[in-house]
Amino acid sequence: MKRMFIVMQFLLLVVCTAQCKRHHTYTCEIDTSKTGYELAAAYDNCTVWNAQKTMTDIECKDIDIRATRLPRSEFGGSYADLNAAENWIQPFYTISPENMSAYPQAPASINGVISAKFKAKDAVDAAFDFRSYGSQGICADVQEDMYDTVYDDILTREQRSKYRSEGKKLRFIPDDDEPPLDDTTNPVGMGASWLDVDPATKVTMDPEDNTTYYYEPWSLYVAYDDTAISDERLRGVRYCKLLSHQALLSWMLEKSFEENPVLITPTSTECTGPSQLESATNGSCLFYSDLYGANYFCADFTGTDKTQVEWQDKCETNAAYDNQTYSNLPCSQRTAEIETFIPGYLGLTGICVVHCQAPDEFILNIYNDNPETRCGGFDFFTPEELGK
């Protein structure tokens, strides 16, 4: 009897392990009576919930995953969070739309790219006191699972057969510092300009095979033990930009059969300058930031998506800012204050435009030497180029 009990326990453990390790086991509720783009949208709603579990190897842990969708204007200021005492993890995400009006068989607009902020495995293990031997999952792991879900669970048998025999292939470049096709590396460890990188620029065609395309899930990893970052909310985080299930479905049903397919429509336009040269009514923020190139800045809040009170709150509560002071004046009228605040003040030497001409745009004014190196990947201009 004892031996049978042990055998049953072993079998139960094997079943649990198999269930936990199986790919694309979407365990939040999916209405599988839906088909096509509707079913893909349902899977999109579960993506971040599941990815938080699989990327941190906690599929079998009973933890409340509070995946929360935000508009882009709020996503930039959000922080993935957790609370081990209350047993929850909260990843945040936003979804950009993809225009499909040129395809009569598809909805006019679908989910395009899912940008997400996850708590990383090192932060989860430390907070929940886990002793897991699994490794931190990467964005490409999640993207592969999403691809498999669309191929296996959404396409019909006939659609799979057509895509397999006639469609162009889609592969994914790992975001783990392995060199992609153009012999550069994915910027794991990149700073705040991660959000502005257009996913369309991460689509490449195999130079030796024009029937194979690659997507590199744009990612960023900030280690939990990164002592250079003082705010704990910004440590132990993994960021991903993922093609949605709907976008992958559009590739398998429509786009992969075209001569020069566009996997995801470019969302960025060339930045010729900010929407305005300084904040007329939103005020400005004087601050130091480790994340923005370890430098001092005065930011003009030129965007239109927030009130002056909301911009002031961004200045005074943003975890990326240190020693910050808000004023309802533009930076150009705070010269004496800026000169006193910034070591090595040289006058205005450069301008970085963040979220250029978008509703959440703001300008980082630089007053030190080598201004372009302090821009952190944002659109850079000299004062002369903008007539300042």
Image: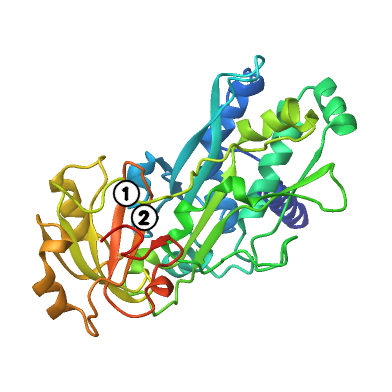
Three-letter residue code for mark 2: Val
Q: How is the image coloured?
A: rainbow
Q: Position of residue 287 (x, y in %)?
A: 22, 69
Residue 324 can be seen, yes or no: yes
Q: Is label 1 in contact with label 2 (beta carbons under 8 Å)?
A: yes
Q: Residues within 10 Å of mark 2 (few under 14, many from 20)?
A: many
Image point 30% across, 78% down: which residue?
A: 368
Closest to the observer: 104 or 150?
104
Q: Position of residue 23 (x, y in %)?
A: 70, 45
Lateral position of residue 48 relative to residue 179, left or right: left
Mark 1 = which residue?
A: 361
Element under disc 2: strand
Q: Position of residue 369 (x, y in %)?
A: 34, 80
Image point 75% across, 35% down: which residue?
A: 260
Ranked by sequence position, the earlier of labels 1 and 2 is 2
Element under disc 1: loop
Residue 316 can be seen, yes or no: no
User: Residue 115, labelled with which disc?
Assistant: none
Q: CA distance from mark 1 to mark 2?
A: 6 Å
Image point 82% across, 53% down: which residue?
A: 207
Lateral position of residue 316 relative to residue 117, left or right: left
Q: How many marks?
A: 2
Q: Residues within 10 Å of mark 1 (few under 14, many from 20)?
A: many
Closest to the observer: 86 or 205?
205
Is 263 rendered above or below residue 334?
above
* Quadrant showing the C terminus: bottom left
Mark 2 = which residue?
A: 354
Lateral position of residue 172 relative to residue 319, left or right: right
Three-letter residue code for mark 1: Glu
Q: Position of residue 332 (x, y in %)?
A: 16, 62
Q: Residue furthest bottom?
A: 344
